[in-house]
Amino acid sequence: MLDDGFHVFDTTLRDGAQREGINLTVADKLAIARLLDEFGVGFIEGGWPGANPKDTEFFQRARDELELRHARLTAFGSTRRAGVRAAEDPQVAALRDCGAPVVTLVAKSDSRHVELALRTTPDENLEMIADTVSHLRENGQRVFLDCEHFFDGYRHDPDYALEVVRTATAAGADVVVLCDTNGGMLPADITRVVTEVREATDARLGIHAQDDTGCAVANTLAAVDAGATHVQCTANGYGERVGNADLFSVTAALVLKRGRDLLPEGSLREMTRVSQAIAEIVNIAPATHQPYVGISAFAHKAGLHASAIKVDPDLYQHTDPALVGNDMRMLVSDMAGRASIELKAKELGVDLGGDRGLLGRVADRVKAMELNGYSFEAADASLELLLREELGEPVRFFEVESWRTIAEHRADGIAVTEATVKLHVKGERVIATAEGNGPVNALDRALRSAMEDVYPALAEVELSDYKVRILEGTSGTDAITRVLIGSTDGRGGWTTVGVGENVIQASWTALEQAITYGLLRQGYAQG
Amino acid sequence: MLDDGFHVFDTTLRDGAQREGINLTVADKLAIARLLDEFGVGFIEGGWPGANPKDTEFFQRARDELELRHARLTAFGSTRRAGVRAAEDPQVAALRDCGAPVVTLVAKSDSRHVELALRTTPDENLEMIADTVSHLRENGQRVFLDCEHFFDGYRHDPDYALEVVRTATAAGADVVVLCDTNGGMLPADITRVVTEVREATDARLGIHAQDDTGCAVANTLAAVDAGATHVQCTANGYGERVGNADLFSVTAALVLKRGRDLLPEGSLREMTRVSQAIAEIVNIAPATHQPYVGISAFAHKAGLHASAIKVDPDLYQHTDPALVGNDMRMLVSDMAGRASIELKAKELGVDLGGDRGLLGRVADRVKAMELNGYSFEAADASLELLLREELGEPVRFFEVESWRTIAEHRADGIAVTEATVKLHVKGERVIATAEGNGPVNALDRALRSAMEDVYPALAEVELSDYKVRILEGTSGTDAITRVLIGSTDGRGGWTTVGVGENVIQASWTALEQAITYGLLRQGYAQG
């Protein structure tokens, strides 16, 4: 177990799951808990036992299946109902009996919410807090108290909000968490209120910040600067509405910018992997521009930057990307010179041997192609294929003889799209036809169908994105078309680009490269 | 023009364009500039004239084509090279002669960068600043100075960083902008440094924050609290690496949380629309969880919230979403309420006669269609056709019997694309076939060819843009395609939208509407 003097408290499994589009199974929750534990958070809030069958099952299975090395499992629940004893409230009993050593209780701290939403008296609310905290403490559980709407409540009625903090502390709550439930606060508000609450009470304080103003990370850090020693976060900032404070941005700031020793040895370097693995489990595409862990977080585009980066990378990055398990990436664009091509080739694992003539040729070819509408900054796979070709090692798995695609909307209202390809694969001529939901989809299916016997692992490669952009010309569909195709094989993704006057021809180029690069990744011998 | 005492300075077109995946045409830049001006920013940084042909063309076309109501156009560039006079530096000449009334000059303020990247002496760097600022001031231009890497530089060598600020101010720079170029700062750092610079100089200060710690919005607000009166932002936070401070989050915080009177009357309510329209132009899916303007920003999932919201919505929202043109969402997924439909109809010149039943029907239909992937934000023409249909005045110039398109790459290397359409025009059945550089282009040509005798003015209508985006499926794994087609007739432009599983079918829908709307504009009687 890590030092208890400062808590990183993760609520991905409870509050994070409130994000629109997230729907976790019990197995998902267990898998995420293992990743969070490995990363090194102090507490993992698993859900609300008793509130729904899934969360109840999670706590049951967690007893047998979840071996935590760093974190303590925490159950979430509410203070008792008005007018009953905590010992007799079934919701409190579920928390008491769930097996979690720690319980986070949510309580009202805004007197308007006590009256309008809870429909009880301010005094009874205080009783509910004291009674429930005491009951769980007597059961040997540690209790954290989440003060819902604390900052709004404090603005409206500071005396009552402070009374909630004092009541919880007196009853034995270990931490009182000030929640910006509606997420409307700015850092200056947080600093002022946390400071005042610290001065007015002797409670240990925590912070829970929603991101509705885009300041959740900053609000969390402001609370820490003002004396909070417990921070609630969610992986990748998942949460209701805009989301919560992002676990990774908060811990990176505390470790790298504030020098706090929060995480197990070596864990920070796993941050990018853990972030992406959790994104995979919740089935939300990783945010490309997420601080520290996004694929663009250390990507440089301006040519000016590239030459300076060769002198000293720290001139143009705020931290070493390796520290958080990420990589610097150079975006090769028409501003690119030799320096960016060299850095890029190294990144792609292609050895150009410092050959200045070759570098110059590649840079010239990239510039010429970009002038004609290509864009390699998002198309690493196409660039790698180009680099290998310039090195005299072109990648070829099949030869194309011809292809044709037909899209039709018949008079009877039926729409059909089909494609036929004629290829030479490992010396054999193959003809295949497939239907699709558009010309490119039909071509993609026909291409796979033609090659699946020879390259069965092609089944793992799939197209994940398709973008078409018309580049300015004199008139719309006469202009040059740029097609970007995103592909994935479950272990990673790559992007290819095709350009041409004919959108299907451009799509075909990107498609042919997408499949070629996929086969290269699968390790097939060329034919 | 708005009050000059506090600047909102937008750099979407310059720094925002550094975002990975953004590649703007001159027409895109002009369209974004119009939206930013309408929103009410004080300054629009258009690019770097002379640095590349696109930016040079932008400033040329802006003189004739860009009528700004609120904003002043700003050119970006660098201080002169070492060892030449500003008057003789062609890069400075391009700034001087570009026609923009304001120039933002980037200068080094970190002595390490002066030596390692610029490869000159600290004194010469100060000379370069003084000389370039004076030269442009003598030309009657207003000058803002961007101090690149100011915060890193100030940490390393505060005296030199301050000397840069004083030199620029003495030479006539109106604002000295402190840039967190590498984005590594936290709000507390910004507060301290801005306060110290204010005390040590008499410069008017601005802030430019990159989002690498996830704190760009908070850092910007921290600088304002510490006395900065010029804030640099980009629409939707687009920018290099993680991005820049988001224009919309920053202005919403300043207006709604700090009570500043920054924007033209009624403009804040257009925020969500403007944000989404810009996302459409740059062809990046709007960020669903963006503060204030994201489709999830006021979406409530927790059942607990729903009942409280029925009592009083303000219990569970930090601000009224209508103030920023967004909507609370509970059950339906939509952006359009009656009010926005009514405003939009008025803008399109369609009189709905304040008919609440009709407004409700249109809002419901728009909601249902947006749920299925339509987006009317950038497709005014499609919305107008829909409004006219709901008014009982559908627009029809032709009836479609069937269409077919074939794209082929033959074994002899020749690529051919052709299309055939069968229509009924003014009672006559017409069949026409045409070739094109892609299926949609061929369909477009066949469609025109079938109608040119009856509607000769169709020759003036042409397609100017074609955008395809794959949307995640609403049900199952089937992806849905959204196509946006831009059209022009020399007097103005319009956009139509088509959605469907089949990209050609979706394109056809948008194409049919594009031509229909064009004929409507030409004043033809329907048949």
Image (cartoon, coloured by chain):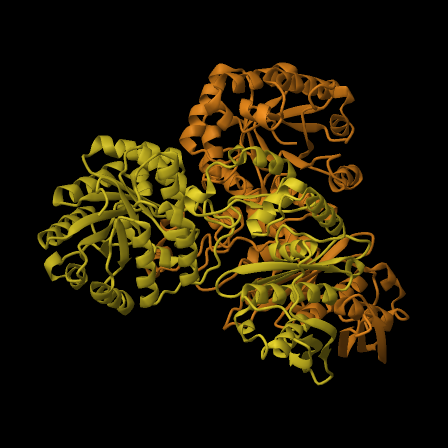
Chain colours: A yellow, B orange
Q: Is residue A113 above or below residue A485?
A: above
What residue lies at 37% left-to-right and 58% top-to-bottom? Answer: A18
Most foreground residue, B300 or A25: A25
The N terminus of chain B - image quarter: top right
Q: Is residue A423 above or below residue B66?
A: below
Relative horizontal placement of residue A216, taking residue A468 as reference (left or right)? left
Most foreground residue, B21 or B446: B21
Instruction: Residue A238: tell me if it is visible.
Output: no
Relative horizontal placement of residue B199, taking residue A61 as reference (left or right)? right
Q: Is residue B76 above or below residue A481?
A: above
What residue lies at 21% left-to-right and 32% top-to-bottom? Answer: A200
Residue A525: x %, y % from top left: 59, 68
Relative horizontal placement of residue A298, taking residue B399 as reference (left or right)? left
Q: Quadrant of residue A277?
A: bottom left
Residue B41: x %, y % from top left: 61, 37
Residue B148: x %, y % from top left: 57, 29
What residue lies at 48% left-to-right and 52% top-to-bottom? Answer: B289
The C terminus of chain B - image quarter: bottom right
Q: Is residue A477 above or below residue B184?
A: below
Instruction: Residue A326: tell me if it is visible.
Output: yes
